[in-house]
Amino acid sequence: MEGRKNYAIVDIETTGAYAGGSRMTEIAVLIHDGVQVVEEYHTLINPKQSIPHYIQVLTGISDDMVSDAPEFENVAAKVFSLLQDKIFVAHNVGFDYSFVHSQLRECGYYLRSPKLCTVRLSRKCFPGLPSYSLGKLCQSLGIAINDRHRAYGDARATAVLFGRILSADNEGHIQLQLKKGYKEHRLPSQVPLSEFEQLPERPGVYFFRDKHGKLIYVGKAINIRKRVHSHFTGNNTSQRRQLFIKNISHIDFEETGTELMALLKECHYIKQHWPEYNRALKQYEPKFGLIDYVDNSGFIRLCICRLPVGSRALCYFDNVVEATQCLLGLIDRFGLDSRLCVFYRDRKNTEPVNIASNAEVRNEIVAAVHNSRIEEAIASLEDQVTSFVVVDKGRNADEKSYIYYKNNKVYALGFMATDETVSGIEDYIKQEDRCHSNFYMCQLVKKYAASYPQQVQLL
């Protein structure tokens, strides 16, 4: 049995699911000395905001019930005195701790307590049960719950459950959770620990899925295990982060061998699935483009402009400098009249450009000659088609990775045996290796190829 320590068994009711925008409506703290409960504290709390109807139905706590209850700032000193120097115990401890920590901090109290999660401890001490939610777990273990979904009733049941855990913990799981630097209690309790334990410390992509198996987030990392754990550190109480963590039920991964392959795979899967919590990353689309159009005087113009998402252009660019260099190069190479080429102008530079409508310019420039040169310049852009393969290390010593850049697009990403050659690259491509290319991926590959030409084989 675990040696004598002072535990604070906590349960709360709230107005919502995230500490950043919701408030506590009730709190119960039971002090347990390792054998029995020796002190109890329970109170309703005025949250200073309306309680949503569905939560009133769930908990039975109405706005009228809390209207005369103390505000948290009036009980913060008492709560802090109970919790200070205790081990914070709760069923799904991350939820309760985030609210208590956040509201105590608002009142000038900084809580730093070791934490124990009775969900995770129950999975260890009572494996194989159909559910580890408090209600169903207590039903499986024959623990009565009075006033379910009320702080005091749930806290009393959790105290009995914790006593069972103390008696059943023959393998030192409590001591392990209390060990300094132990991070498991930060992880979502709804995710099987085995899925964390299988994460490698190597480059790749990882996938967060909801309880139905739907992909909700894709990430990339040089060290998958370290990066996944970093998602669950800190005390960020924003609604988006709290809901994000709450919705994660499963984690899996795919090793990639290299950081570049991880970056490309992440882009590919986001474009393929558009997971809910991956924002539509702006860098995946080009910001500027070179377009052509015919003005009202019959002259074909080349114009650098900011591109709306999904727009088509002759060339795409990350920034104005690259676009300007390209257009200046075309002007020099094909003898274009710069007065008929439109360079990018931001809102601060709105001077109109309409030279071609000026009669004097029309007399100086023959439209047919000018348009012929423009068409040659455009054809030269279309002729600049490149294909190559970037070969790098694989996921193990028996393979190598390849990135097939075909006709100015990232065509496929995959792995081949170390003794295979890229001359027959089309024969090695599996259907699942084909990828959803975009501007950002192409930029990554071109920049990498320029930096490491020894790993590039032209086709």
Image: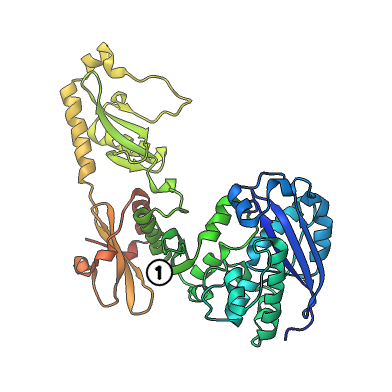
Q: Tell me the element at label 1.
A: strand
The quarter of the displayed image where residue 60 is located? bottom right
Q: Position of residue 275 (x, y in %)?
A: 42, 55
Is residue 436 rendered to the left or right of residue 199?
left
Q: Amino acid at mark 1?
A: Glu
Which one is nearer the viewer's eye here, 437 or 211?
A: 211
Q: Is residue 150 above or below residue 193?
A: above
Which one is nearer the viewer's eye here, 310 or 397?
A: 310
* Count of number-bearing discs: 1
Q: Is residue 264 above or below residue 295?
A: below
Is residue 139 rendered to the left or right of residue 37?
left
Which one is nearer the viewer's eye here, 141 or 339?
A: 141
Q: Position of residue 325 (x, y in %)?
A: 36, 38
Please rate how many residues cluster around mark 1, counting C-alpha atoms within 10 Å: few if below 14, some from 14 to 19, many from 20.
some
- Residue 84 in sight: no
Q: Position of residue 149 (x, y in %)?
A: 65, 61
- Residue ID at (36%, 42%): 317
Disc 1: which residue: 254
Is residue 423 rendered to the left or right of residue 242?
left
Which one is nearer the viewer's eye here, 124 or 220?
A: 124
Residue situated furthest top in the rendering: 359
- Residue ID at (69%, 71%): 157
Could you tell me which quadrant the C terminus lies in?
Answer: bottom left
Q: Position of residue 201 (x, y in %)?
A: 50, 73
